[in-house]
Amino acid sequence: MIAVYQGSDYFEAQLLTGLMEQAGLQVFLQGAALQGGMGDLPALGHLSITVNDADGDRALEIIQAYENGDYALEDED
């Protein structure tokens, strides 16, 4: 297993997990259960996404595409 994401944004981690699963990767989101226990304390990097070693490059490509805005929704006027 290889960690491909570490952060503290629960919604971003869930979104990335969904994108990777949609691409057929087996994904493990760790630390999500800690979200409710944080309270008012600033906790950084408690979420991590891991994938199988063989899927590491593909997972990083998906993260890069997300960061580049490739998955952004377009406004319809």
Image (cartoon, grey):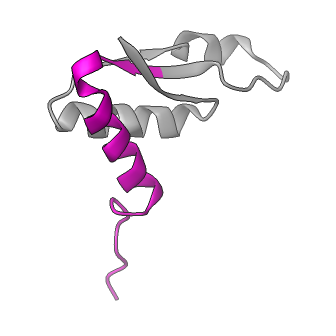
Reply above or below: 60 against 2: below
Image position, residue 23 (x, y; %): 17, 38
Reply above or below: 46 against 25: above
Image position, residue 48 (x, y; %): 52, 21
Query: Viewer-proximal residue, 52 or 36?
Result: 52
Q: Quadrant of residue 31?
A: top right
Image position, residue 44 (x, y; %): 73, 26
Residue 43 within the segment the image draws in magenta: no
Given the current orientation, which residue lies at the most extreme right position? 41
Q: Total marks drawn?
A: 0
Residue found at x 48% / y 33%: 13
Q: Quadrant of residue 51?
A: top left
Which quarter shows the N terminus? top left
Stretch in magenta:
49-77
Residue found at x 32% / y 45%: 62
Residue found at x 64% / y 30%: 8
Residue found at x 35% / y 67%: 73
Image position, residue 63 (x, y; %): 40, 44
**Apparent side of residue 6 relative to residue 40 in the rendered image (left or right):** left
Q: Quadrant of residue 49?
A: top left
Residue 52 within the segment the image draws in magenta: yes
Reply above or below: 65 against 70: above
Given the current orientation, which residue lies at the most extreme left position? 24
Which quarter shows the C terminus? bottom left
**Apparent side of residue 55 relative to residue 65 in the rendered image (left or right):** left
